[in-house]
Image (tube, grey):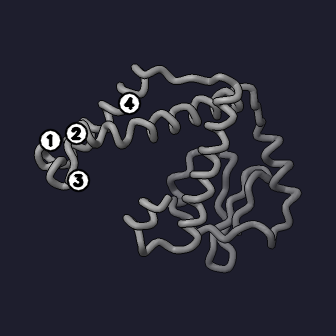
Amino acid sequence: MEDYRRDNPNLSDTVRCNVLEQYIGQKILAEQADRDSVIVTDEEVEGALENRIRYFINMSGSEEKLEETSGKTVYQLKDEYRPIFREQMIAQRMQMQVMQNVKITPQEVAVFYNKVPQDSLPFILPWWRSDKLCSGQKSIKKSNNMQSISSKGFVRIS
């Protein structure tokens, strides 16, 4: 977390809070995975690490440029990121295990969101164009310079 804060000093408090929340969530999942004996093999970690290092090399232009930019050799980068990758992969596997039997229907989503008072829903500026919505069930209504999505009572955004 300190590395993230040091590398990104101009982030808002909201973004920092979200990053911290994700970090804590990952730690909780990793701890539960340890208790449930969820494992990730060394080969899986090395494969993911190799892919990421290859990506960094491609982005940098060459292995030498990556090492120059980071101030570390590829081997040092791998050693530094290996435990981070292992924990992330274990947390992801635990999350998949927890979520594999969760089934939520569109009707359940509609019931949940329809119980939330209209004035309690967050303001979200739409990033889509109304002519790009493809489902016939969805409609865009203009209201007070904001767009509201209505999909048979599904999600109301104001």
| Residue located 36% across and 26% down the image | 46
Marks 2/1: CA–CA distance: 8 Å
Mark 4 Cα shell of 10 Å, populated few (<14), some (14-19), many (≥20): some
Judging by the rendered image, the residue that carries numbered circle 4 is: 48
Amino acid at the residue labelled 2:
Val
Measured as percent of width and height from the top left, residue 125 is found at 58, 69
In this orientation, which residue lies closer to the viewer: 18 or 64?
64
The reply to whether dot 4 and dot 2 touch (C-beta < 8 Å) is no
Marks 2/3: CA–CA distance: 9 Å
Task: Tell me if residue 145 comes above or below residue 22 in the rendering.
Answer: below
Q: Quadrant of residue 18?
A: bottom right
Judging by the rendered image, the residue that carries numbered circle 3 is: 70
Marks 4/2: CA–CA distance: 14 Å
Amino acid at the residue labelled 1:
Glu
The reply to whether dot 2 and dot 1 touch (C-beta < 8 Å) is yes
Q: Earlier in the sequence, mark 2 or mark 1?
A: 1
Judging by the rendered image, the residue that carries numbered circle 1 is: 63
